Image (tube, rainbow, N blue to C red):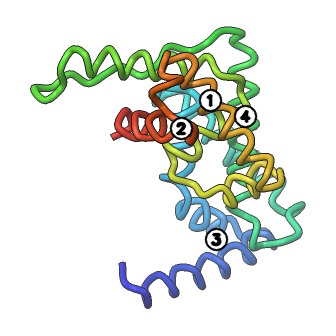
């Protein structure tokens, strides 16, 4: 997509959002469609299976439709919608009162047994983190969101998000037994996390 197409899409999104907030159902559906892949990625990272992720998205769309006239700033539509989705996912996880199984590892000819074991161990350690640390790590490394985007989404200062990210990576290093090897800045854990997601 070139710059002109991106600019047109942004302009269309603004128009659809304004129309949706005034009650235009078609515009609302078009606007939601623009964020469907981002929504699915976030829902899947919380729910860990496609069916539950799609149910969370369905509930989100329903709530967005019901509450769309309450949004005052059209520029915040995506952030508002993703926040609703995250709350739905977290509520569902609380209802289950147990940790959901991690995603299955895909076996292929390029995957060695130590890589699979490391991948499972990494995912297991991430699942054990406190929700705020897990959320920031998933949004940063799985959804490739910036610190600023995460801060807006969670309505927290950038410094808080940086602290949660640092603390989460520190706990991951400790859980993985890589405290000394990872060094002071957590690069080894970050690289390992990125490798597990690829």
- Percent across and percent down for residue 153 are 73, 53
Q: Position of residue 93 (x, y in %)?
A: 68, 21
The percent position of residue 25, horizontal first and vertical second, equals 68, 65
Q: Which residue is mark 4?
A: 88
Above or below residue 18? Residue 121 is: above
Rounded to the nearest whole Å, what is the CA distance between mark 3 and mark 4? 23 Å
Q: Residues within 10 Å of mark 1 (few under 14, many from 20)?
A: some
Residue found 50% across the figure and 24% down from its top: 180
* Labelled disc at residue 170: 1
Most distant residue in the left direction: 109
Q: Name the side, left or right, on which 29 lies relative to 108.
A: right
| Earlier residue among tags 3 and 4 | 3
The image quarter containing residue 69 is bottom right
Task: Tell me how far mark 1 sits from mark 2, CA to CA.
Answer: 7 Å
Asked whether the beta carbons under mark 1 and mark 2 sit within 8 Å of each other, the answer is yes
Which is closer to the viewer, label 3 or label 4?
4
Q: What mark, if any, has residue 27 been given in the picture?
A: 3
């Amino acid at each position: 997509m070139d710059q002109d197409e991106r600019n047109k899409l942004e302009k269309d999104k603004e128009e659809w959002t304004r129309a949706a907030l005034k009650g235009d159902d078609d515009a609302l559906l078009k606007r939601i469609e623009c964020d469907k892949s981002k929504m699915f990625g976030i829902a899947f990272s919380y729910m860990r299976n496609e069916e539950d992720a799609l149910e969370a998205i369905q509930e989100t769309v329903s709530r967005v439709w019901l509450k769309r006239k309450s949004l005052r700033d059209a520029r915040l539509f995506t952030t508002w919608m993703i926040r609703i989705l995250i709350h739905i996912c977290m509520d569902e996880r609380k209802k289950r009162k147990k940790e959901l199984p991690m995603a299955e590892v895909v076996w292929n000819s390029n995957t060695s047994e130590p890589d699979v074991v490391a991948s499972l161990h990494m995912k297991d350690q991430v699942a054990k983190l406190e929700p705020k640390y897990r959320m920031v790590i998933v949004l940063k490394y799985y959804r490739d969101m910036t610190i600023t985007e995460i801060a807006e989404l969670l309505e927290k200062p950038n410094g808080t998000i940086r602290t949660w990210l640092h603390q989460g990576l520190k706990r991951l290093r400790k859980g993985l037994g890589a405290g000394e090897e990872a060094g002071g800045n957590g690069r080894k854990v970050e690289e390992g996390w990125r490798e597990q997601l690829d």
